[in-house]
Amino acid sequence: MTATLAPGLAAQAASAAPRQDTTATATTATTATANDPLAPFTHQKPDWRRCGADTPARFRCATIKVPLDYRSPGSAAIDVAISRIRAGDAGKRRGVLLSNPGGPGGPGLDLPLALSKDMPKAVTDRYDLIGFDPRGIGRSTPVNCGLADSERQWPRHYRPFGESVRMAKSVADKCRAKAGGTLAHITTRNTARDMDVLRAVLGEKKISYFGVSYGTALGSVYTQLFPGRADRFVLDSAVDPARMWRKMFQIWAPEVEPAFQRWSQWTAEHAAAYRLGKTPAEVRATFWGLVKRADRDPIVVGGDKVTGTDIRLILRREFFTVRSAAELVAVLRDAAAGKPVPEFPTAPEDGDNGVSALWSVVCGDNAWPRDPQTYYRDSVRDAARYPLFGDFVSNIAPCAFWDRPAEPATVVDNRVATLILQNEWDSQTPLSAARNMHRALKGSRLVTVDEGEGHGVAYGMAQGPANRCAQDTATAYLVTGVLPAEDVTCRAVPGRKPTNPAPAAFR
């Protein structure tokens, strides 16, 4: 894979020269359009209106048009919904701070509201907080494939494999039938290009950015395509840009194994509180005993029957936050003994748009293997290597039956100044991914939260306890523009309760 995209927005038009600013310089709109096929988009004037009767008056929304296909900007256009909260102090204003909460498939239109509450005044005084629903998502010409409930469930166990193949093909076929002409263009690269159209529409030479989880992938691709337009970028809980996307999902299996060992050690040290075992070996035996029991005879929890496969699917994330996992396993133990227990928490189900957009992005960003047997062999291998989750992560996905991507994958390799925040124990984007992002972004600094738990670190996006050291480092960078002289290590205490659950859209 090579970075074939020029740094200018118009680079996708044949023979269009790359440039560092798409703001019109011609004297007439006609001349600008002739010289720059993106001028009709970059010259838009947003019609800002109050986002809703139940939202603050300062929270304004608008809709802009962007090209469906940047290689042919005049062929078709789609909507991108945008939002803004103006900087609190016009005298201190630095510019705009775009944001993305994660996904792929997560809407970001309401994110400025959350950030305005969780970011310190030193930041909100200096930046207009800008949100947007990425293309294909929410109010931005959404992709909806009409998927059944069972087709929206992922990851899924690879056995029986024939059923997994049929399910994956059904999803791909439905998406092609419902949105075939759009799918190839719902990609991270095109969303980054949309961000640059938004930059021009807002009249800014550069943008600053706060992206979480998938938002780090989007931010890194923007720095690759538009390095001269990236101001102060903070990437929280980083995706490995070289693993997008199948390898990024596959990494969950090997990463959960040491998290499980750490959890069993912590839980044994707190045996008096949870009564799951006095030694790590006893704790692990308790857990696997419950899994085997539930596979043989599902455990009834809050009226629902929970199998051993269900337990592993749910607990895979929880093992990275030791207290949460201990509490949930204790609930399972009591339920198996017939004791009354609260409902077993499960992750909120994504709607049709969220799942449809997710597959559009991860299948459109780069090519996946086409042969189903590749997925079967990998699943058998990983199931043996990684008992906790290996039989999920390599299973066949709709991408095996997706149309080929319209463009090669973007290789991230640049020296744009960025700040990366990362918990040591992150269930979705592990520390190894952040380190690889750090290597790809050679101008970056990495803030590692030693013993930090959960997905997300700063500004109300943490699923685990917030870390003041990491957040203060990010704030200092956003306010001053000065990166730390070297990488930073912050400290955390395992087992603390979360202080601020992340928004539902954050995955």
Image (spheres, rainbow, N blue to C red):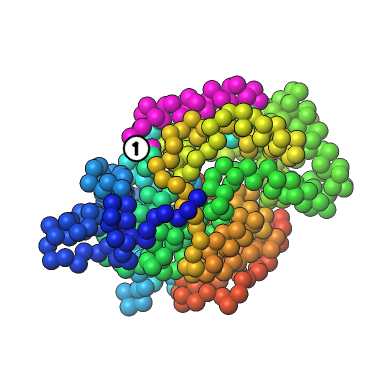
For disc 1, the marked residue is: 182
SS at mark 1 in the image: helix
Q: Are there few (<14), some (14-19), or many (20+) residues within 10 Å of tag 1?
A: some
Quick check: can you spot residue 474? no
Q: Residue at x 13, y 66 (%)?
A: 27
Q: Residue at x 42, y 54 (%)?
A: 4
Of 226 and 170, which appears nearest the observer?
Answer: 226
The stretch of residues the image draws in magenta is 159-183
Residue 95 relative to residue 268: left or right? left
Question: Does 175 lie within the magenta span?
Answer: yes
- Where in the figure is residue 456, as x and y percent of width and height? 57, 56
Residue 101 relative to residue 281: left or right? left
Q: Quadrant of residue 195?
A: bottom left
Question: Does 447 lie within the magenta span?
Answer: no
- Where in the figure is residue 388, as x and y percent of width and height? 72, 38
Residue 109 relative to residue 383: left or right? left
Quick check: can you spot residue 144? yes
Q: Residue at x 60, y 37 (%)?
A: 346
- Where in the figure is residue 333, as x and y percent of width and height? 77, 35
Q: Quadrant of residue 275?
A: top right
Q: Main secondary structure of the magenta part?
A: helix
The mark total stands at: 1
